[in-house]
Image (cartoon, rainbow, N blue to C red):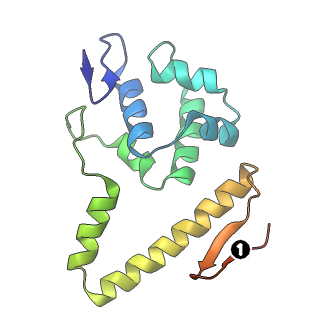
Amino acid sequence: MKLNNTTLNPQVSPLSERFNQTLDIYRISAKNLSKLTGITEGHISEFRRGKRDISTKVLFRLLDAMEDLAPGAKSYLLMTEDMPTTTYKAPLQKMLSDMIQVAEKDELLDAMNAIARRAEALCAIAHKLGYHHNILVEEDSQSKKYAPKR
């Protein structure tokens, strides 16, 4: 049976299912998890599909890397309240747009600061993962200015 493009397998542990769901929701790739943790993509993939278990040591390494890549992912995975295994969510862009439309000035300023901090964190993670591309910092209608390589 398929639900939200995920095949439900009765042999998959609830932890593997929740792990897979979290990676999908937070758009975390096994490749980036592997680079940050040293755990092979194959090992991560097998755990996601319920084909193998992982040790608590490996789980904590994965959780820490997930949190580095997408703040909130670790907490989401570890939520203990009963939740349906399927999450229905509006696209992120629509949710953000709706929130911006009703936000007060101080809330918008706080949000912009949070976005700036998140962008800095993503740049640091990209650097850690070996991505050294120029980062667009300012654009006008005539030209693009890029930050120097770090």
Q: Quadrant of the N terminus?
A: top left
Give the percent coordinates (x, y) of residue 90: 24, 51
Residue 54, can we see it?
no
Task: Decide if residue 113 is on the left or right side of residue 130.
Answer: left
Image-quadrant location for residue 15: top left
Query: Which residue is most to the bottom?
Result: 105
Is there any visible trace of residue 95 in the rendered image?
Answer: yes
Q: Position of residue 42 (x, y in %)?
A: 62, 21
Q: Please tell me which residue is depicted at 43% across the width and 48% down the height of the picture.
A: 73
User: 51 or 127: which is nearer to us?
Assistant: 127
Query: Circle 1: is it few (<14), some (14-19), or many (20+) Cα within 10 Å?
Result: few
Q: Residue furthest front?
A: 142
Location of residue 12 in the rendering, given as x and y in whole percent from the top left corner: 37, 16
Answer with left or right where residue 149 lies relative to residue 52.
Answer: right
Q: Which residue is mark 1?
A: 146
Q: Secondary structure at mark 1?
A: strand
Which quadrant holds the C terminus? bottom right
Residue appearing at x 47%, y 79% in the figure: 113
Q: In the rendered picture of this protein, how many numbered marks are placed on residues? A: 1
Name the amino acid type tagged 1: Tyr
Task: Name the residue located 27 percent from the left edge and 60 percent from the top edge.
Answer: 94
Residue occupying image coordinates x 53% and y 45%: 66
Residue 119, above or below 126:
below
- Name the spot of residue 95 as percent of width and height, x first: 27, 61
Residue 148 vertical position relative to residue 93 in the rendered view, above or below: below
Above or below, 146 against 57 in this view is below
Write down the quadrant of residue 138 in the picture: bottom right
